[in-house]
Amino acid sequence: MEKFNGGHYNTDFDPSAPPPFKIAEIRAAIPKHCWVKNTWRSLSYVLRDVLVVSALIVAAMKFDSWFFWPIYWPLQGTMFWAIFVLGHDCGHGSFSDSSMVNSLVGHILHSSILVPYHGWRISHKTHHQNHGNVEKDESWVPIFVMWLDFVTYLHHHGYTHKLPWYRGQEWSYLRGGLTTVDRDYGWINNIHHDIGTHVVHHLFPQIPHYHLVEATKAAKPIFGKYYREPEKSSPLPFHLIKYLIQSMKQDHFVSDIGDVIFYQTDPQLNKKNHHE
Ligand SMILES: [Zn+2]
Ligand SMILES: [Zn+2]
């Protein structure tokens, strides 16, 4: 037995082996009400975020001094990220049953943080449909949001056991979706609308964000070892920095051959970094 993150993994477990369960079994395990979209509830999160953003702007104008700005930037950056996540629901159509409401709210929310909503929505759909497929996956290139870079990277890289990528016949929607990882962000979980529950979101993007924690809990017994329990966070997710650094040091390239592949390390690259 090998131990990490407080959990136990049998070293015999091969995360790239085809899972013994079907996507329909996971779907069936998730309670019915988790699939229901409530437009008013979704809008209440928009209201909450807009109020916090406004309060921060008022505070910034009131204090307008050298000590407040460095506090303001990460706080407001986190709130912009939260707003992005609500627009993300709109892009998946999980904000509301009305496609008109999804488009309108998504457009307004993303425009307010300078994200081109429809361009992002289309490429994000490609990302979900092809996740884990080394030839087809597409990650939208973010324009300015630091959080987006950080969180997106963490959900797709860097775990104690390397995450597999697939090619050709080996790839399936289920196997690809299972190669994402959940993360615990401590207090920020609630602020950024539980985007850390990424595995279930990847498989079923139609589930609204406010049901993802419950849906994940219900799906876990089916996932078994294919679910990688996230390391518990302290109030602020500083523990994630080590995953980020470790993954950047190790995950450099994937091979051009083979149908089940893992990130490999370029020794030259590390050497160069070391000498600089
Ligand atoms: Zn993703
Ligand atoms: Zn998504």
Image (spheres, rainbow, N blue to C red):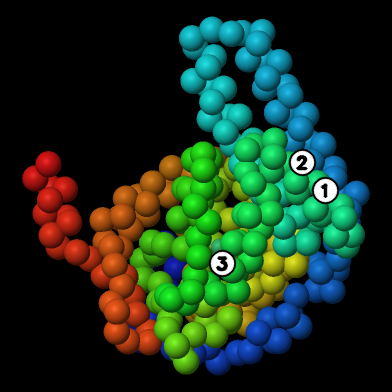
Q: In which quarter of the image is residue 7?
A: bottom left
- Could you tell which of marks 1 and 3 lies nearer the N-terminus? 1
**Where's residue 42, x and y in %?**
83, 50
Q: Mark 1 points at which residue?
A: 104
Q: Identify the image quadrant of the N terminus.
A: bottom left
* Residue at left offset 62%, top offset 82%: 222
Q: Is residue 230 visible?
A: no
In the rendered image, the quadrant that contains the C terminus is: top left
In front here: 55 or 120? Answer: 120
Q: Residue 108 carries which label?
A: 2
Distance CA(mark 2)–CA(mark 3): 23 Å
Q: Position of residue 141 (x, y in %)?
A: 49, 52
Q: What's the residue type where badge 2 is placed? A: Ile
Q: Between disc 2 and disc 3, whose residue precedes?
A: 2
**For the residue with label 2, is its CB less than 8 Å from the closest atom of ligand 2?**
no
Residue 118 point in image, percent of width and height: 69, 54
In terms of secondary structure, where does tag 2 sit? helix
Picture quadrant of residue 33: bottom right
Q: How far apart are marks 1 and 3 (CA)?
A: 22 Å
